[in-house]
Image (tube, rainbow, N blue to C red):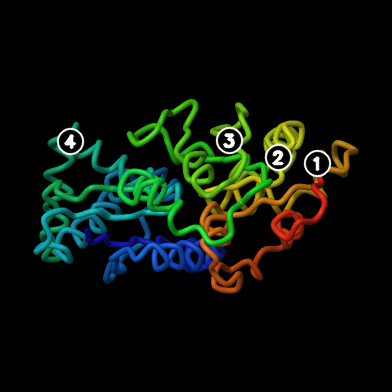
Amino acid sequence: MKYIYYPGCSLKSTGKLYEESLLAVFDALEMDYVELDDWNCCGATAYMAVDERKAFVLAARNLALAEEQLKNEPEVNIVSPCSACYMILLKTQKFLEDHPEDKAAVTKALKESGLNYTGKARVRHPIDVLVNDIGEQEITKRIKKPLKGIRVASYYGCQTVRPYSTFDDQRNPVTMDRIFKAAGAEIVDWTMKTRCCGASLTGTIQEVALPLSYIILHEAKKRRADVVTTACSLCQFNLECYQDDMNKKFKTDLKIDVIYFTQLLGIALGIDPDKLGIHRLFVQPEDIYKILEGGNRVYV
């Protein structure tokens, strides 16, 4: 099966390490993919608040481009790793299905630039593809450095599995757990998987965002997690980079690694850490390496 990769803006900037690790994992699993030509911003939350219909045109353009680029393939699977992009593309499809008048306006706008969206494109998240197309058995076969002894708290954030996604349970998703179980890790059972971390509020109303992130990390540490894995650039940044601020505010000594799920899976697949963007993290996951190399566990 051939996939079309839609990076979105963040994976070409602050989330570059997510892109590096994602594509390295795709290569290690011998997936057939190509980047979407001439893609544009999905509109995400900011533009949607300014002009909803124009925002849907932006997102629909990417869907139409994908259909055109893979027009000779039996299926058009567009892989969108950014949680916001993934949600917006699904939201656009749902909106166009439910609102024929708006769909006609969007179709007209696309036609003026020579594009046509038919609804053939299928928006997929990498977690969905890894679990349901590649499969846990195949992942296990390719593991070179099993994550033995590492307790993983899978964190999806508030947009990956809701409200439009259909590949996992919206309240208690388990697909990321299945990937890491296939890679040999211990899975942490916790209730924070889809709790909001504060997202962009960290840059605007930090006194609101910090408690939201702190609750998530505090619970992960209480459950003796060694690492929190995420699939969202904003979540990764919030949870990794503001731990000192959380400790100062709540008078704690909280410290836990927060990395992309593709980085941890890439380590298990034996990929060079530099190819996974590990060096771009603000805090190196030294505790993970200690466990993999037989060092002492941190949270016992």
Q: Using residue 284 as the reference point, say whether residue 157 is left or right of it.
A: left
Q: Earlier in the sequence, mark 4 or mark 3?
A: 4
Closest to the observer, 173 or 56: 173
Q: Which numbered marker is on residue 113?
A: none
Q: Which residue is mark 1?
A: 299
Q: Amino acid at mark 4?
A: Glu
Q: Which residue is at a point 55% across and 67% down the rendered structure image?
A: 276
Kindly report the distance in space between the C-alpha atoms of the residues bearing marks 4 and 1: 49 Å
Kindly report the distance in space between the C-alpha atoms of the residues bearing marks 4 and 3: 28 Å
Q: Which residue is mark 4?
A: 97
Q: Which residue is mark 3?
A: 196
Helix, strand, or loop for circle 1? loop
Q: Amino acid at mark 3?
A: Cys
Kindly report the distance in space between the C-alpha atoms of the residues bearing marks 2 and 3: 19 Å
Q: Earlier in the sequence, mark 4 or mark 1?
A: 4
Q: Which residue is mark 2?
A: 225
Q: Earlier in the sequence, mark 1 or mark 3?
A: 3
Q: Amino acid at mark 2?
A: Ala
